[in-house]
Image (spheres, helix red, strand yellow):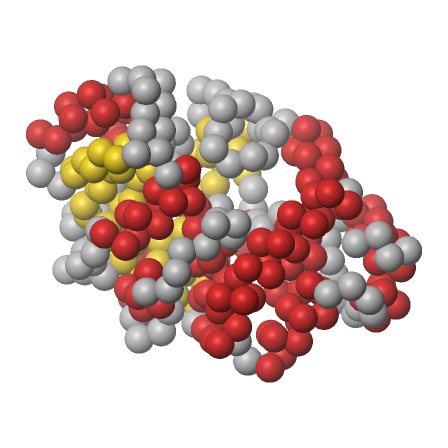
Amino acid sequence: MKKVNILLSAWNGEKYICEQLDSLLAQTYPDIEIHVRDDGSSDRTREIVKEYLVHPNVKLYEGENLGFRGSFAWLLANCRDADYYAYCDQDDIWMPEKISRAVKALSKYDDIPAIYLGDFYWGDDQCRPQWQYKNADREHTLVKYITSGDMNTFGFTEVFNECCAAGIRDRKPLTLCAHDQINYLYCRCKGKVIWDKKPTAYYRRHGDNASPQELVGGNRLTHTLWQVRTFLLQSGRERVYEKFQEFYDAYSDIMDDKEKKTFELYLNKGHQFKKALYRGRYRDKAAEELMMRTLFLLGRI
């Protein structure tokens, strides 16, 4: 049976980490190891995780604070010897069949870098489901990904194979582009991306999440306002482009000519009419699509 390493980075997670660990131990897939790295917590996170060490498949690593990017990079570099890997946050809840569904989907692509992304429910601070994200129903293109910035891929939904892990861990860690973005882009450019329409997790939004979405309780309005401020206003756009430039500089060797040209076009200023008249879509919603094209035409992004 193929082995799955679940990579969980924890920081001051005493409030919710028990629910997450319980959901991991309740997975229907039998061959998993849960690798928890405490990222320099100042609360009782380490003590709580130590109580779970009675389970032989739970491992704890204590270290200095690296931030979530550095902490996940450490886990990927040091927790090896598995067929598949899954990133895991400390405050969500996974459904029992999450890993089973991922392994079944990925098992067809062991010879190329492949990543599985499950759907999920946005949850409130009690992880009560608010609405289903339905990510698999969205159009996913490289142009849309680079220009929208709102990646539509989340680390806790990702399960990926050793081909993907090996191709990433042997390179210099990136400091701007997040772990989940790197995995998705690597597999998109060099391998296979698998979208699952079935929700397999509850995404808890409580206001203190490491990820920056200002979405407490799954409120659609606050999420939309966050998207506009982060991805459409000039200061936010510059940060988005910096992340993708970092990925391009580090991974352009795996890209074909079309992918390279896409990155080069949108990461450089100019060609505003070409961008404004692009035949595909930039955003899912019509109003956001019109705004993007207008901003391109005016040379604002």
Q: Position of residue 182 (x, y in %)?
A: 47, 57
Residue at 30 percent across and 48 percent down: it is 74
Compared to 211, does 189 lie above or below? Answer: below
Q: Give the camera-side residue of 99 and 205.
A: 205
Residue occupying the far right of the picture = 298
Q: Give the camera-side residue of 198 and 218.
A: 218
Total count of labels: 0
Q: Position of residue 21 (x, y in %)?
A: 26, 31
Residue at 51 percent across and 52 percent down: it is 177
Q: Quadrant of residue 51?
A: top left
Residue occupying the far bottom of the picture = 257
The C terminus lies in quadrant: bottom right
Q: Is residue 133 visible?
A: yes
Q: Position of residue 112 (x, y in %)?
A: 36, 74
Q: Is residue 131 left or right of residue 172?
A: right
Q: Position of residue 201 (x, y in %)?
A: 41, 38
Q: Is residue 240 left or right of residue 38?
A: right
Q: Quadrant of residue 105?
A: bottom left
